[in-house]
Amino acid sequence: MKLGFIGLGIMGKPMSKNLIKAGHELVVCNNSIEPVNELVAMGAKAALNGAEVAKECDVIITMLPNSPHVKSVALGENGISDTAKPGTILIDMSSIDPVESKIIGGELAKKGIEMLDAPVSGGEPKAIDGTLSIMVGGKKENFDKFYDLLMVMGGSAVYVGDLGAGNIAKLANQIIVAVNIAAASEALTFAQKAGANPELVYQAIRGGLAGSTVLDAKAPMMLDRNFKPGFKIELHIKDLTNALNAGHAISAPVPLTSQVMEMMQVLKADGFEKEDHSSLVKYYEKISNVELEK
């Protein structure tokens, strides 16, 4: 299948590579040229903008930072809607405001363009492995039609409802991940301050009820002082901003989300926004005046 792929960042680049490895022909577009050149070396074709991609592809995947970027690529000047034929489908795998997904989808529908919102969870490691968790909103028949394509990039793809529901699920996911990382940071810093070895504490608790995928992914990073981003603090701030806005709009209280948002804002103020969200431990280290040691 010939596919368009727009957005070759930390997540998009490995996702694109997995599609090429699966035998798909790709037309790719990105703001910076380096990842484009990397994909071209694997057999992809480069395009300058969304309009060029849509001229050649009836199926287009976007993996972009936030709502304005998706709206610009889909509806803006030289965007997908300028040249896309009726029946084209946009599979937006970005994590954006669900309200914006509905707005973008509504505008595209006026030109006969279908849309799925299909955000992912799992960070760079699972993007590389092709084992992402994919949450999909839109027409069920479109989900069924492109399920196998999504599973090239994912370990699971779950239909959760109408357009926008994928991003609602993603915001729920990001709330849980953020609170889990904060709890792990708090617990391990507590252990260090109390005089226990935090690595041994982690090994002791990971097999019990406190164990989780988040704990196993992020505690070792904290203990190794490895904050190379699989998912940046600044991107989690974006997701929590969307979660807080959505929660306020529907009168759904999100007090834990707001607390973790403030912790991340401290890290941003301290210059750590480009680091992995496991850097939340630095917030606790700062207020506890202690640093994790293995």
Image (spheres, rainbow, N blue to C red):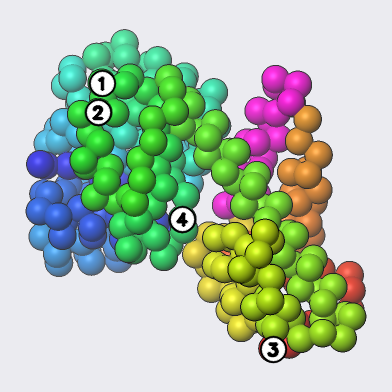
Mark 3: secondary structure: loop
For this view, does 200 lie left or right of residue 138? right
Query: Of callouts 1 and 4, which one flags the residue occurring earlier in the amino acid sequence?
Result: 4
Can residue 44 be seen in the rendering of this structure? no
- Asked whether disc 3 touches disc 2, contact meaning CB atoms under 8 Å apart, the reply is no
Crowding at label 4, few (<14), some or many (≥20) Cα neighbours within 10 Å? many
Q: CA distance from mark 3 to mark 2?
A: 47 Å
Amino acid marked by disc 4: Gly
Q: Which residue is mark 4?
A: 122
Looking at the rendered structure, the secondary structure element under dot 4 is loop
Task: Name the image quarter holding residue 110.
Answer: top left
Quickly name the residue at label 3. 294
Q: Verify whether residue 242 appears in magenta.
A: yes
Q: Give the answer, above or below, for where 188 lies relative to 77.
A: below
Amino acid type, mark 2: Asp
Read off the residue under disc 1. 141
Give the alpha-carbon distance from disc 1 to disc 4, as whole Å.
26 Å
Residue 238 spot, x, y in % from top left: 61, 45
Q: Which mark is residue 207?
A: none
